[in-house]
Amino acid sequence: MLQQTQVGVVIPYFERFMARFPTVAELAAADEDEVLHLWTGLGYYSRARNLLTAARAVDAAGRFPESVDELMELPGVGRSTAGAISSIAFGHPAPILDGNVKRVLARYTGLEGWPGTSANQHALWESAAANTPPTRCADYTQAMMDLGATLCTRTRPACAMCPLHDDCAARRTGSTERIPAPKPKRERPTRETHMLMLETPDRAVLLQKRPRRGIWGGLWSFPECGLETIEATLDLLAGNHHRVDPVELEPVRHGFTHYRLLIRPLHVKLLTNPGTVSESATMGWFPLDAPIEVGLARPVTRLLDRLRTAT
């Protein structure tokens, strides 16, 4: 869940995105590169791709799905999101279990341990379903999310103001600061990669579109390689006689959920404008001093800014 300070940062990105695609039909007709470009800064780029695919599915069907089962057929829509849409948009009695509701129900039932375990997830879904009323579903769903966001907060919950005060197991046992238990910490490994930042005399840089699967799927990035293949990759991209020796720049660190990535950028100035790499759907030269209006991973935008400001 986004923290309050993060919400203030991402709102302009959402506003820009929604201003460009105010309807499902307009989003469905959009080019993926434009969608990813406008999503730049929001992270989790698979969500942008799923949003585009879902918009195209809805537009092709001519109607927005209403039931939880139908909604879950859309890419990127899980059970909780489907329940929220079904209940709030269509008034169906569908339980949800987002982070806020999970915290409320864990405290209300006195659930011990991390809520993310299979057993605890099952128990919370049962509690969510049991407490979802058959009427005024939209009001109840919104109220539960708001309760967790405003009163039943992660730290220092406002128990005295909570409408569930009398029946809350965690409040009765003085366990509100302990429940729900945090996710067990696990050391994230570090992986390394080299990014080849080829720059032509007229200040164009070579970017490559990444495969749809994997990190930064569908985004444009500098070509990558391992330490042992740097020379071979450079020879393939620019040829043997049109470049100077690579200059290693300050590393860039980027964190993912399951690992940390250490990027070692290699700046390679070409002596002539190369003809060995042709423009294609997955690789091309982009003017460094003009806006690059394709989807870019955050570390790539940082590296581009370095090149722009370098003397």
Image: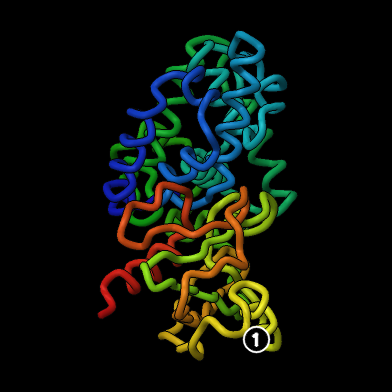
Colour setup of the view: rainbow
The residue beneath circle 1 is 231
Residues 78 and 300: in front is 300
Residues 211 and 94: in front is 211
Which quarter of the figure has residue 310? Answer: bottom left
Task: Give the side of residue 142 with respect to residue 150, left or right.
Answer: right
Question: Which quarter of the rendered picture does the C terminus lie within?
Answer: bottom left
Query: Label 1's element?
Result: helix
- Going by the numbered disc 1, the residue's amino acid type is Glu
Q: Position of residue 281 (x, y in %)?
A: 62, 48
Task: Give the side of residue 16 with respect to residue 164, left or right.
Answer: left
Give above or below for 15 relative to 64.
below
Task: Determine the residue positioned at 27% across, 47% down.
Answer: 8
Task: Determine the residue positioned at 47% across, 36% down.
Answer: 167
Which quarter of the figure has residue 127? Answer: top right
Task: Give the side of residue 16 with respect to residue 205, left or right.
Answer: left
Q: Position of residue 129 (x, y in %)?
A: 64, 27
Task: Give the side of residue 151 with respect to residue 230, left or right.
Answer: left
Task: Determine the residue positioned at 65% across, 32% down.
Answer: 79
